[in-house]
Amino acid sequence: MVTSKRKMEHLDICTRENVESKGSGFEDVEFIHRCLPEINKSEISTSTTFLGHKFNAPLMIASMTGGHPCTMEVNANLAMAAEELGLGMGVGSQRAALEDPKLEDTYRIVRDKAPHAFIYGNIGAPQLSEYTIEDIERAVSMIDADAMAIHLNFLQEAIQPEGEVDARGIIDRIAAIAEGLSVPVIVKETGAGICHGDAYMLKKAGVAALDVGGRGGTSWAGVEVFRARMEQDSISEHLGIKFWDWGIPTAVSIVEADMGLPLIATGGIRDGVMVAKALALGASMSSVALPLVSAARISSEKVKRTLELYIEELKAVMFLTGSRTPEEIRRAPIIISGKTRDALEARGFNWKAFAQR
């Protein structure tokens, strides 16, 4: 029940507090405006495919919640929006249901409400030593998952007083799961980004896709600040404040993690313009979480309206860059400046190539 209680605390904190980190890097990315786009906006298609599944737009609802009775309605509202819009979504860590089967319905509701949508499951890398392949297959079957995400959250674990901080052997366990699981494995960071070297290791381990989960969205170090204050834990509060903005900005991490695998850009995606920028930097998809939390606690229609705005904004960018499809906007010229350019240059990446496409 400790895990279940923590799930609800996280959801409440994300609803009522400002828990965003600074600097996704997208502020340093600009498109070249086409005053003669030479396309008809009404003919633009945002459809794409990811891991063999068709999406009406390159957008997913990122992993958020499940594992507490009060999260069932939230997951239901998210799933109904994903189903209606032809998108996809992930569930929060299924650890709570693996510990207590009575909580499985808080996750299963997603497949019930979204029978045709792409749905991915979620387990935490720090807990992999506790699970067998059979346990993870149970998480897959719980929601009839199309893929399984393994989330990396060692920044958060380092700050939690109950955090699990033995990171030894994680890559070998990921490789074993990628080889033995019945569905593709996605490895996702949760707010601190994936660097080039780690992306290379993950590709060698056989994962099917990466979710960069970079800095600029929800800071889980920041979330832990508010939990620490509730528990009057001054050390965790201090660490959370100190590491609030730790990590690789999402825009930088997209370039860093490009190993030829499908990439999901998560972390500070706050409108359709950012979705477009993520695609132009090399992402296959984008996903969003925090902007949907409050809406999901009200109704599926509010979630749907938010996502519809993202899609319409993406279409506007596609029109103004002369891009008929997501594939074309991935080739649209962009200008990279500021700290993002400096970071890419310092790491040896050819940022100038983006403007020369």
Image (cartoon, helix red, strand yellow):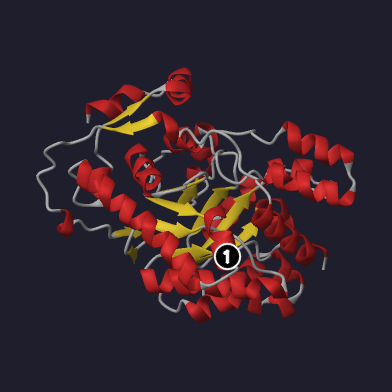
Image point (51%, 44%), residue name: 268
The x, y position of residue 101, in whole percent, is 72, 78
Q: Residue 202 or 52: which is nearer the viewer?
A: 52
- Judged left or right of residue 39, residue 139 is right
Task: Say which quarter of the image contains residue 54.
Answer: bottom left
Disc 1 packing (10 Å; few <14; some 14–19; many ≥20)? many
Image label count: 1
Answer above or below: position of 281 versus 160: above
Image point (27%, 45%), residue name: 317
- Judged left or right of residue 154, residue 191 is left
Residue behind mark 1: 91
Image point (27%, 57%), residue name: 46
Q: Residue 204 or 183: which is nearer the viewer?
A: 183
Q: Is residue 141 visible?
A: no
The x, y position of residue 43, in whole percent, is 15, 58
Answer above or below: position of 218 versus 136: above
Answer above or below: position of 110 versus 20: below
- Judged left or right of residue 116, residue 215 is right
Q: Quadrant of the N terminus?
A: bottom right
Q: Is residue 138 visible?
A: yes
Q: Quadrant of the C terminus?
A: top left
Answer above or below: position of 230 versus 236: below
Q: Which amino acid type corresponds to the residue marked 1 in the rendered image?
A: Val
- Secondary structure of the residue carrying tag 1 is loop
The x, y position of residue 11, in whole percent, is 68, 60
The x, y position of residue 291, in whole percent, is 53, 54
Image point (42%, 73%), residue name: 83
